[in-house]
Image (cartoon, rainbow, N blue to C red):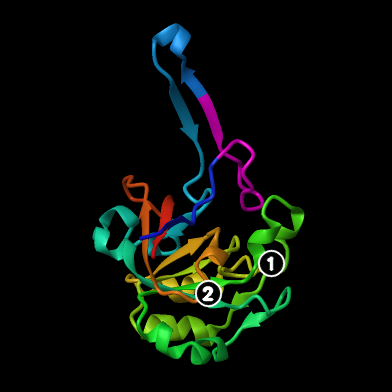
Amino acid sequence: MRVIDLTRTISNTIPVYPGTEGPSLTIANTYEESGFKETLLQMYSHTGTHMDAPHHIFPEKISLDKKDVSAFVGKACIIDARDVGPGGTIDITYIQRNKERVDGAEFIIFQTGWEEYWGQEEYFGEYPVISKEVAAYIVDNNKKGIGLDNIGLDPIADLELKLHHFMLANENIVIMENLCNLDLIGQQEFLLVALPLKFENSDGAPIRAIAIL
């Protein structure tokens, strides 16, 4: 068994969505003064590698803390879309070419190659996004969720978050963003475990996402 970490480390310098305040990790208690170390964490719920709940977009829909924990574990496959250029669209042919793997998966992860820009200005640029048809396929086929190695399901310029609205209207769906290390998995099917921090009425939360091969 191999276990691969798909999670970015949260730090005071981690890239965050434009307009969002970065996290603050402050040492609240020290070994010297208190006999132990404790850190005060202050951050937005969509910091780092994180998961979006339907409650992120719709006030009446389910939050992560109210989902059964089985919603965060399942068979997954990676769709390699690194040949899609900046600003391009991942269309339904990517699903069709990988249909056997996609049919057997509960989570569909799209590898855009954008993680190579992590920590650079380009990361907030025109990353590839899925088409509405691909989004509809995931929803209509009762998948548990979608994952991405970039910062957003929607284009960075789309303030209306149209794909978020479309996908999260289905309460069974979750969205994972800022995944990493997808190149260590390739075409293999794997078990995805993506457990969100459990806090009340969570619209989203940082996750510790791992792949078990």
Mark 2 is surrounded, within 10 Å at the Cα level, by few (under 14), some (14 to 19) or many (20 or more) other residues, namely many
Q: Is residue 91 above or below residue 149?
A: below
Where is residue 117? Give x, y as percent: 70, 58
Query: Which corner quadrant holds the C terminus?
Result: bottom left
Q: Is residue 204 visible?
A: no
| Drawn side of residue 136 relative to residue 150, left or right | left
Magenta residues, as a range? 11-26
Q: Nearer the viewer, residue 101 or 205?
A: 101
User: What residue is at 61 percent from the left and 44 percent from the top?
Assistant: 14
43 over 157 or under it: above or below: above
Q: Is residue 18 above or below residue 170?
A: above
Q: Which residue is mark 1?
A: 157
Q: Residue at x 50, y 67 (%)?
A: 185
Image point (56%, 91%), residue name? 93
Residue extending furthest toward the right: 121
Magenta residue check for 13? yes
Number of numbered markers: 2
Q: Main secondary structure of the magenta part?
A: loop
Going by the image, does 167 lie left or right of 161? left
Percent x, y of residue 24: 56, 33
| Residue type at the position of mark 1 | Ala
Q: Is residue 80 visible?
A: yes
- Which residue lies under the disc numbered 2? 163
Question: Residue at coordinates 41% horizontally, 89% vertically from top-left?
Answer: 100
Q: What separation in Å lies between label 2 and label 1 (alpha carbons)? A: 13 Å
